[in-house]
Amino acid sequence: MAKIQSRKEAHVRIAAKADSEYLKSAGFENIEFVHCSLPEIDLRKVSLSTSFLGRKLSSPLAIEGMTGGYPNASKINRRLAQAANGANIIFGLGSQRAMLKHPELAKTYKVRDVAPDVFLIGNLGAVQLREYSPKAIEGMLKTVDANALALHLNPLQEAVQPEGDLNWAGVLHQVRLLCDAIDVPVIAKETGAGISAKVALQLKEAGVSAINVSGSGGTSWSRVEYKRGKPVPGFEEWGIPTAISLAQCSGILPLIASGGIRNGIDAAKSIALGADISGAARPFLISKNPLSLIREWEMQLRTAMFLTGSKDIAALKRAPITITGRIADSLSAMGLSVVSYFRR
Ligand SMILES: Cc1cc2nc3c(=O)[nH]c(=O)nc-3n(C[C@H](O)[C@H](O)[C@H](O)COP(=O)(O)O)c2cc1C
């Protein structure tokens, strides 16, 4: 098996273990909805439907990109894509670099025969843009029939792993060239260390269509890399917690929350913090029945909406929340108003 393939396989094996997560949380325990004792709506009529990049979805959930490029990845992608298709939510593929290098691996990413209607997001590392032309990337997306491209920004993972890409000079320029050249919408995505407002604004200016904050508090890539090799130690807890990254990036571009979202209540809180879509990777990787996990999260989301008197996703976005503890401290230190989330 080629190096890139065995690396992808090791990532899935290690990330599936419980101790591959951050010790620090994504921050959702510091976010509380203000309970509403008079919801004045019918729980059964609460609507989870929404739209993202022009596509109507049954609920604002996503299974985040994880894998591809080795034989067993095909099974994982197809199983998860089928569940996402059944629920009409978003599904993401893992990095497609392996299929750019070895075109015969394209089949490990192909899911359209089992997920004909799913909103499918392709995936590539932004640091790899120097190696591949926009035309090659368009071809890569066409091969799997993707609706959008997630361009992942993972400098933490690259910096700590033995075979990482260390030269990140000029990446923003490459992102701009790609956005100018291709018709498919580009989503800039972290892989667990979070995106700041400053970076989100730079990405917007470069032409990306959406941001996936993928903050810290869930899967820790430096922890996964530590278990795999001999990386630079000490960065297991590095990164912007998801709740903080969301509050920073809210309102800049359409926004996906991920990184430590572990149930439908976390998903509801992420939406109240500004997300349009709430996604997760590891929980679906380890789930025995991904479709029933989606249904459970939807039920939790719907119940949280009922208990805040929110009849739809637009109303949930305005539901009052309190932000306390370390998340409030961080936001205040950045000059963001915590009380504005309560008084709305
Ligand atoms: C096994 C595994 C493989 C992943 N591979 C990729 C990848 O190829 N590209 C990418 O953008 N993100 C990748 N991620 C990151 C996830 O998409 C997500 O941003 C991150 O894991 C945070 O979500 P979580 O805490 O729910 O796992 C991977 C995550 C896992 C668990």
Image (spheres, rainbow, N blue to C red):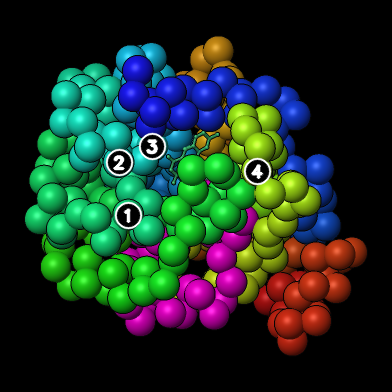
Give how far apart the Cα atoms at labels 1 and 4 are. 21 Å
45 and 265: which one is in front? 265
Which residue is depicted at the point 33% across and 48% down? 124
Q: Nearer the viewer, mark 3 or mark 1?
A: 1
Q: Position of residue 257 (x, y in %)?
A: 55, 54
> Quick check: is the Cβ at mark 3 less than 8 Å away from ligand 1?
yes
- The residue carrying mark 4 is 231
Q: Residue lying at the far right in this picture: please name it.
A: 325
| Mark 1 burial class by Cα count in 10 Å: few <14, some 14-19, many 20+ | some
Left or right of residue 95, residue 183 in this image: left
Q: Position of residue 19 (x, y in %)?
A: 75, 29
Asked if residue 84 can be seen in this view, the reply is: no
40 and 26: which one is in front? 26
- The residue carrying mark 3 is 94
Which residue is depicted at the point 83% across and 57% down? 30
Q: Label 3 is placed on what type of residue?
A: Gly
24 and 185: which one is in front? 24
Q: Residue lying at the far bottom in this picture: please name it.
A: 335
Q: Please determine whether, in this image, residue 252 is positioned above or below residue 232.
A: below
Give the mark nearer the N terminus: 1 vs 4: 1
- The residue carrying mark 2 is 97
Q: Please determine whether, in this image, residue 199 is positioned above or below residue 223.
A: below
- The residue carrying mark 1 is 128
